[in-house]
Image: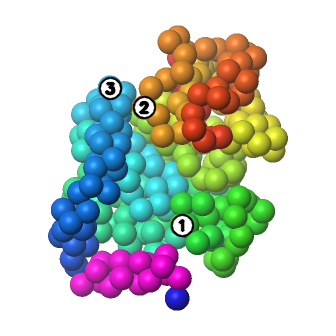
């Protein structure tokens, strides 16, 4: 059995017996040197989002995975609705965040252009599961998952102050299920030809919902590239050339603010 699979089995067992959080804290204590960088990164996440979100802001976490971003939003004081279709991720997401009570709501759905079902292709790493079969690394398995839309989520939970979208190439499909502007939104970009086109299409779609300004945060960073937020036409003149060498990886987040 591969190391990743063993870790997954152990994690599922710990969650099943209700000891996820204490075992996680013990693991952190025993691996302080290894986890120091992770802790510092998480503190930077909290600091970054605390400057963007007010206390009691409503956040949608689309593609929540195991809840690292959701937990950061909650620690800032936000209310979170987390969307994650992978059952194994959902178990850990709930174990990580459910103690925040009614400030946290988990939805075991993907988000797309219209309600229904679709095939999600899973990989060894749950964070790169995708609706694209040819996404990044070899497919491990596939599952059928239910799909809702952002408009339906807004009808149920209210309009979010911030919506984070991290769905491995499915960003445009998520946005197609939205027919109204959201005050603050971010979605992942990748510097490969198909995904550059997807990013441009996402910006075009959001532009049609209302006036927007755009900024960008390269992968694993916690600051915006541009001092001033840019209108779409100006941003697209500079994307991806002005950001391709700024981060250590060829992906990051496009941020969109409604005016």
Circle 3 SS class: loop
Residue 149: horizontal and vertical position, in percent? 59, 53
Instruction: Give the mark nearer the N terminus: 2 vs 1.
Output: 1
Residue 148 makes an appearance in the image: no
Q: Which mark is residue 222?
A: 2
The image quarter containing residue 242 is: top right
Judge whether 83 appears above or below 223 on screen: below
The color scheme shown is: rainbow
Q: Which of the pair 74/253 is nearer the observer? A: 253
Chief secondary structure of the magenta span? helix
Q: Viewer-proximal residue, 44 or 129?
A: 44
The part of the chain drawn in magenta is 2-17
Q: Secondary structure at mark 1?
A: helix
Tag 3 residue = 51
Marking on residue 38: none
Residue identified by numbered label 1: 126
């Amino acid at each position: 059995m591969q190391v990743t699979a063993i870790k997954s089995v152990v994690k599922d067992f710990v969650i099943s017996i209700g000891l996820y959080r204490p075992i996680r804290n013990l693991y952190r204590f025993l691996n302080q040197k290894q986890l120091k960088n992770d802790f510092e990164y998480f503190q930077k996440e909290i600091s970054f989002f605390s400057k963007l979100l007010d206390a009691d802001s409503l956040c949608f976490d689309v593609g929540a995975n195991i809840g690292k971003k959701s937990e950061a939003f909650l620690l800032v004081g936000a209310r979170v609705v987390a969307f994650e279709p992978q059952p194994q991720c959902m178990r850990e997401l709930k174990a990580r965040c459910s103690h925040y009570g009614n400030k946290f709501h988990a939805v075991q759905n993907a988000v797309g252009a219209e309600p229904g079902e679709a095939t999600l292709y899973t990989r060894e790493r749950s964070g790169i599961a995708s609706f694209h079969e040819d996404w990044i690394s070899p497919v491990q398995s596939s599952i059928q998952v239910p799909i809702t839309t952002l408009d339906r989520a807004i009808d149920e939970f209210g309009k979010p102050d911030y919506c984070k979208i991290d769905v491995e190439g499915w960003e445009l499909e998520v946005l197609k299920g939205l027919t109204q502007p959201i005050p603050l939104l971010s979605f992942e970009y990748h510097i490969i030809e198909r995904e550059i086109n997807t990013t441009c299409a996402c910006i075009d779609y959001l532009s049609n919902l209302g006036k927007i300004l755009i900024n960008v945060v390269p992968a694993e960073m916690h600051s915006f590239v541009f001092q001033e937020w840019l209108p779409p036409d100006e941003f697209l003149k500079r994307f991806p050339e002005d950001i391709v060498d700024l981060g250590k990886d060829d992906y990051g987040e496009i941020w969109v603010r409604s005016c």
